[in-house]
Image (spheres, rainbow, N blue to C red):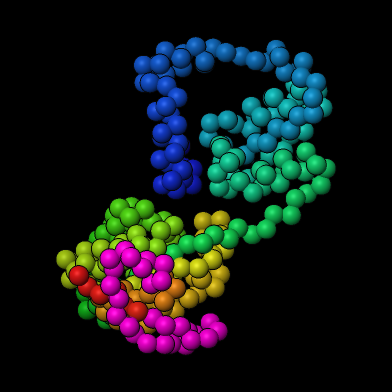
Protein backbone atom coordinates (compact mmCIF):
# COMPACT_ATOMS: atom_id res chain seq x y z
CA UNK A 1 0.00 0.00 0.00
CA UNK A 2 1.14 3.52 -0.73
CA UNK A 3 2.54 5.01 2.53
CA UNK A 4 1.70 8.54 1.36
CA UNK A 5 -2.04 7.87 1.29
CA UNK A 6 -4.14 9.13 4.24
CA UNK A 7 -5.04 5.63 5.46
CA UNK A 8 -6.75 5.13 8.78
CA UNK A 9 -6.48 1.78 10.53
CA UNK A 10 -9.90 0.57 9.37
CA UNK A 11 -9.08 1.23 5.70
CA UNK A 12 -5.61 -0.26 6.15
CA UNK A 13 -6.98 -3.49 7.65
CA UNK A 14 -9.73 -3.78 5.03
CA UNK A 15 -7.34 -3.20 2.14
CA UNK A 16 -4.83 -5.70 3.53
CA UNK A 17 -7.60 -8.32 3.83
CA UNK A 18 -8.68 -7.56 0.27
CA UNK A 19 -5.13 -8.16 -0.98
CA UNK A 20 -4.81 -11.42 0.95
CA UNK A 21 -8.11 -12.73 -0.40
CA UNK A 22 -7.47 -11.57 -3.97
CA UNK A 23 -4.38 -13.68 -4.59
CA UNK A 24 -1.65 -15.64 -2.88
CA UNK A 25 1.94 -14.36 -3.00
CA UNK A 26 2.75 -17.07 -5.55
CA UNK A 27 -0.12 -16.03 -7.81
CA UNK A 28 0.96 -12.39 -7.65
CA UNK A 29 4.50 -13.36 -8.61
CA UNK A 30 3.15 -15.18 -11.68
CA UNK A 31 0.60 -12.55 -12.71
CA UNK A 32 2.54 -9.31 -12.35
CA UNK A 33 4.97 -9.93 -15.27
CA UNK A 34 2.00 -10.84 -17.48
CA UNK A 35 0.00 -7.79 -16.44
CA UNK A 36 2.93 -5.50 -17.13
CA UNK A 37 2.85 -6.66 -20.76
CA UNK A 38 -0.85 -5.90 -21.28
CA UNK A 39 -1.57 -2.79 -23.35
CA UNK A 40 -4.97 -1.45 -24.32
CA UNK A 41 -3.72 1.57 -26.26
CA UNK A 42 -5.14 0.33 -29.55
CA UNK A 43 -8.61 0.03 -28.05
CA UNK A 44 -8.86 3.63 -26.82
CA UNK A 45 -9.98 5.16 -30.16
CA UNK A 46 -12.79 2.60 -30.36
CA UNK A 47 -14.50 3.86 -27.17
CA UNK A 48 -17.81 5.45 -28.18
CA UNK A 49 -19.34 6.47 -24.85
CA UNK A 50 -18.95 9.74 -22.88
CA UNK A 51 -15.73 9.43 -20.93
CA UNK A 52 -14.27 11.33 -17.98
CA UNK A 53 -10.62 10.89 -17.00
CA UNK A 54 -9.93 12.16 -13.46
CA UNK A 55 -6.25 12.53 -12.64
CA UNK A 56 -4.44 13.78 -9.52
CA UNK A 57 -1.47 15.97 -10.36
CA UNK A 58 0.95 14.37 -7.89
CA UNK A 59 -0.16 10.75 -8.23
CA UNK A 60 3.13 8.84 -7.65
CA UNK A 61 2.10 5.77 -9.71
CA UNK A 62 -0.12 7.03 -12.54
CA UNK A 63 1.46 10.24 -13.81
CA UNK A 64 -0.57 13.07 -15.39
CA UNK A 65 1.05 12.26 -18.74
CA UNK A 66 -0.63 8.85 -18.63
CA UNK A 67 -4.03 10.34 -17.84
CA UNK A 68 -3.70 12.86 -20.64
CA UNK A 69 -2.60 10.12 -23.04
CA UNK A 70 -5.79 8.16 -22.34
CA UNK A 71 -8.05 11.23 -22.65
CA UNK A 72 -6.40 12.35 -25.89
CA UNK A 73 -7.04 9.00 -27.57
CA UNK A 74 -10.68 8.53 -26.55
CA UNK A 75 -12.90 10.60 -28.87
CA UNK A 76 -14.53 13.46 -26.95
CA UNK A 77 -13.12 12.46 -23.58
CA UNK A 78 -12.98 15.07 -20.84
CA UNK A 79 -9.74 15.33 -18.86
CA UNK A 80 -9.78 16.79 -15.33
CA UNK A 81 -6.64 17.19 -13.25
CA UNK A 82 -7.03 17.69 -9.51
CA UNK A 83 -4.39 18.71 -6.95
CA UNK A 84 -2.95 16.08 -4.62
CA UNK A 85 -1.59 12.55 -4.81
CA UNK A 86 -4.69 10.43 -4.20
CA UNK A 87 -4.63 7.14 -6.12
CA UNK A 88 -7.88 5.68 -4.84
CA UNK A 89 -10.70 8.17 -5.22
CA UNK A 90 -12.95 6.39 -2.73
CA UNK A 91 -10.78 7.33 0.27
CA UNK A 92 -10.01 10.79 1.60
CA UNK A 93 -9.63 13.28 0.03
CA UNK A 94 -12.50 12.08 -2.18
CA UNK A 95 -14.68 15.21 -2.31
CA UNK A 96 -13.27 16.89 -5.43
CA UNK A 97 -13.29 13.61 -7.38
CA UNK A 98 -16.90 12.99 -6.40
CA UNK A 99 -17.96 16.47 -7.46
CA UNK A 100 -16.33 16.14 -10.87
CA UNK A 101 -17.92 12.72 -11.47
CA UNK A 102 -21.32 13.97 -10.29
CA UNK A 103 -21.22 16.98 -12.61
CA UNK A 104 -20.13 14.80 -15.54
CA UNK A 105 -23.03 12.39 -15.00
CA UNK A 106 -25.78 14.89 -14.14
CA UNK A 107 -24.73 18.12 -15.81
CA UNK A 108 -24.65 20.19 -12.63
CA UNK A 109 -22.40 20.53 -9.61
CA UNK A 110 -23.24 18.58 -6.46
CA UNK A 111 -23.82 20.42 -3.22
CA UNK A 112 -21.83 18.27 -0.81
CA UNK A 113 -22.52 18.99 2.83
CA UNK A 114 -19.61 19.20 5.23
CA UNK A 115 -18.73 15.82 6.66
CA UNK A 116 -19.99 15.28 10.19
CA UNK A 117 -19.19 12.19 12.22
CA UNK A 118 -20.09 11.00 15.67
CA UNK A 119 -16.78 10.50 17.45
CA UNK A 120 -15.12 10.52 20.84
CA UNK A 121 -12.43 13.18 21.14
CA UNK A 122 -9.49 12.92 23.52
CA UNK A 123 -7.31 15.84 24.63
CA UNK A 124 -4.15 15.27 26.64
CA UNK A 125 -1.41 17.59 27.82
CA UNK A 126 1.53 17.51 30.22
CA UNK A 127 0.96 19.05 33.66
CA UNK A 128 3.22 22.02 34.54
CA UNK A 129 4.98 21.79 31.19
CA UNK A 130 6.19 25.40 31.22
CA UNK A 131 7.86 25.01 34.60
CA UNK A 132 9.40 21.67 33.67
CA UNK A 133 10.76 23.07 30.40
CA UNK A 134 12.37 26.00 32.22
CA UNK A 135 13.96 23.70 34.80
CA UNK A 136 15.28 21.16 32.29
CA UNK A 137 16.47 23.39 29.47
CA UNK A 138 15.60 23.09 25.80
CA UNK A 139 17.70 20.04 24.92
CA UNK A 140 16.51 17.77 27.75
CA UNK A 141 12.94 19.02 27.47
CA UNK A 142 12.78 18.25 23.77
CA UNK A 143 14.15 14.76 24.43
CA UNK A 144 11.45 14.24 27.06
CA UNK A 145 8.78 15.51 24.67
CA UNK A 146 9.95 13.05 22.02
CA UNK A 147 9.65 10.20 24.52
CA UNK A 148 6.20 11.43 25.60
CA UNK A 149 5.02 11.65 21.99
CA UNK A 150 6.23 8.12 21.29
CA UNK A 151 4.31 6.79 24.30
CA UNK A 152 1.11 8.59 23.29
CA UNK A 153 1.30 7.39 19.68
CA UNK A 154 1.96 3.84 20.81
CA UNK A 155 -1.19 3.84 22.94
CA UNK A 156 -3.24 5.48 20.18
CA UNK A 157 -2.22 2.67 17.83
CA UNK A 158 -3.01 0.07 20.50
CA UNK A 159 -6.55 1.39 21.03
CA UNK A 160 -7.19 2.28 17.36
CA UNK A 161 -7.32 6.03 17.88
CA UNK A 162 -6.45 8.56 15.19
CA UNK A 163 -4.04 11.36 15.97
CA UNK A 164 -5.58 14.59 14.69
CA UNK A 165 -2.93 17.10 15.71
CA UNK A 166 -0.43 18.09 18.38
CA UNK A 167 0.42 21.43 19.90
CA UNK A 168 3.53 21.61 22.03
CA UNK A 169 2.96 19.08 24.79
CA UNK A 170 -0.66 18.21 23.93
CA UNK A 171 -2.48 15.77 21.67
CA UNK A 172 -5.92 15.73 20.08
CA UNK A 173 -7.13 12.31 18.97
CA UNK A 174 -10.45 10.83 17.89
CA UNK A 175 -11.98 7.38 18.30
CA UNK A 176 -15.00 5.57 16.90
CA UNK A 177 -15.44 3.71 20.21
CA UNK A 178 -15.97 5.59 23.51
CA UNK A 179 -14.75 2.80 25.78
CA UNK A 180 -11.49 2.43 23.82
CA UNK A 181 -10.98 6.19 24.05
CA UNK A 182 -11.26 6.14 27.84
CA UNK A 183 -9.00 3.13 28.22
CA UNK A 184 -6.47 4.77 25.90
CA UNK A 185 -6.45 7.90 28.07
CA UNK A 186 -5.89 5.74 31.17
CA UNK A 187 -3.07 3.86 29.46
CA UNK A 188 -1.37 7.11 28.41
CA UNK A 189 -1.71 8.49 31.94
CA UNK A 190 -0.12 5.37 33.45
CA UNK A 191 2.61 4.94 30.81
CA UNK A 192 4.03 8.48 30.95
CA UNK A 193 4.58 8.26 34.69
CA UNK A 194 7.65 6.15 33.91
CA UNK A 195 9.05 9.30 32.27
CA UNK A 196 8.56 11.27 35.47
CA UNK A 197 5.72 13.39 34.09
CA UNK A 198 2.00 13.71 34.67
CA UNK A 199 -0.71 14.34 32.12
CA UNK A 200 -4.33 15.43 32.27
CA UNK A 201 -6.93 14.11 29.86
CA UNK A 202 -10.44 15.17 28.84
CA UNK A 203 -12.94 13.34 26.66
CA UNK A 204 -16.35 13.95 25.10
CA UNK A 205 -18.49 12.20 22.52
CA UNK A 206 -20.42 14.28 20.01
CA UNK A 207 -20.75 15.28 16.37
CA UNK A 208 -17.55 16.62 14.83
CA UNK A 209 -16.97 18.40 11.55
CA UNK A 210 -14.31 16.71 9.44
CA UNK A 211 -12.12 19.27 7.69
CA UNK A 212 -9.58 17.28 5.71
CA UNK A 213 -7.22 15.83 8.30
CA UNK A 214 -8.54 18.15 11.02
CA UNK A 215 -11.79 18.15 13.01
CA UNK A 216 -13.86 20.94 14.53
CA UNK A 217 -17.29 21.80 15.83
CA UNK A 218 -18.97 22.05 19.21
CA UNK A 219 -18.04 18.46 20.14
CA UNK A 220 -14.36 19.30 19.89
CA UNK A 221 -14.82 22.53 21.87
CA UNK A 222 -16.52 20.62 24.69
CA UNK A 223 -13.70 18.07 24.78
CA UNK A 224 -11.12 20.86 25.05
CA UNK A 225 -13.03 22.55 27.89
CA UNK A 226 -13.36 19.26 29.77
CA UNK A 227 -9.63 18.64 29.43
CA UNK A 228 -8.82 22.11 30.79
CA UNK A 229 -10.69 21.23 34.01
CA UNK A 230 -8.89 17.94 34.59
CA UNK A 231 -6.35 17.67 37.37
CA UNK A 232 -2.92 15.98 37.32
CA UNK A 233 -3.19 12.29 36.42
CA UNK A 234 -6.96 12.71 35.97
CA UNK A 235 -9.08 11.40 33.11
CA UNK A 236 -12.17 13.61 33.02
CA UNK A 237 -15.23 12.87 30.87
CA UNK A 238 -18.56 14.47 30.12
CA UNK A 239 -21.73 12.78 31.35
CA UNK A 240 -22.58 12.11 27.70
CA UNK A 241 -19.57 9.85 27.42
CA UNK A 242 -20.21 8.17 30.78
CA UNK A 243 -23.74 7.26 29.68
CA UNK A 244 -22.41 5.60 26.53
CA UNK A 245 -20.15 3.18 28.41
CA UNK A 246 -22.56 1.99 31.10
CA UNK A 247 -21.97 -1.72 31.56
CA UNK A 248 -18.33 -1.54 30.42
CA UNK A 249 -16.92 -2.09 33.89
CA UNK A 250 -15.49 1.43 34.04
CA UNK A 251 -16.24 3.34 37.22
CA UNK A 252 -16.56 7.09 37.66
CA UNK A 253 -16.45 9.69 40.39
CA UNK A 254 -18.66 12.77 40.28
CA UNK A 255 -16.95 16.10 39.71
CA UNK A 256 -20.11 18.22 39.75
CA UNK A 257 -21.78 20.52 37.24
CA UNK A 258 -19.69 23.08 35.37
CA UNK A 259 -20.18 25.89 32.91
CA UNK A 260 -17.89 25.36 29.95
CA UNK A 261 -16.63 28.54 28.34
CA UNK A 262 -18.42 29.19 25.07
CA UNK A 263 -20.75 26.19 25.49
CA UNK A 264 -24.42 26.67 26.48
CA UNK A 265 -25.79 25.20 29.71
CA UNK A 266 -24.21 23.28 32.56
CA UNK A 267 -22.29 20.08 32.05
CA UNK A 268 -21.84 17.28 34.55
CA UNK A 269 -18.30 15.99 34.60
CA UNK A 270 -16.93 12.76 35.98
CA UNK A 271 -13.44 11.41 36.63
CA UNK A 272 -12.56 7.88 35.67
CA UNK A 273 -11.85 5.99 38.89
CA UNK A 274 -8.39 4.44 39.02
CA UNK A 275 -8.51 0.64 39.15
The image shows residue 187, relative to residue 228, as above or below, that is above
Rendered residue at 80%/21% (across/down):
48
In the image, is 13 to the left or to the right of 186?
A: right
Rendered residue at 56%/37% (across/down):
88
Q: Where residue 109 sits: x, y (%)? A: 78, 49
Based on the picture, tell me whether residue 29 belongs to the magenta stretch: no
Q: Where residue 164 sits: x, y (%)? A: 45, 60
Residue 139 in sight here: no
Quarter of the image holding residue 25? top left
Rendered residue at 66%/43% (across/down):
97
Q: Nearer the viewer, residue 216 or 252?
A: 252
Q: Where residue 259 sits: x, y (%)? A: 47, 88
Residue range of the region highlighted in magenta in the rendering? 242-269
The image shows residue 71, relative to residue 141, as above or below, that is above
Based on the picture, tell me whether residue 262 belongs to the magenta stretch: yes
Q: Where residue 177 sits: x, y (%)? A: 40, 58
Amino acid sequence: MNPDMPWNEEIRATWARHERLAASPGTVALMMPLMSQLHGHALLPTVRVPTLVVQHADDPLILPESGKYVADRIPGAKYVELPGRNIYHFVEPWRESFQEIYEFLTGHQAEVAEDRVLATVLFTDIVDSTRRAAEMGDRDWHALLDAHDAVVRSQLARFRGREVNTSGDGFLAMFDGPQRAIRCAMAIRDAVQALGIEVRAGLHTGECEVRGDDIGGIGVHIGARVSALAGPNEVLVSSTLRDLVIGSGLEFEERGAHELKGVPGEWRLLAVASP
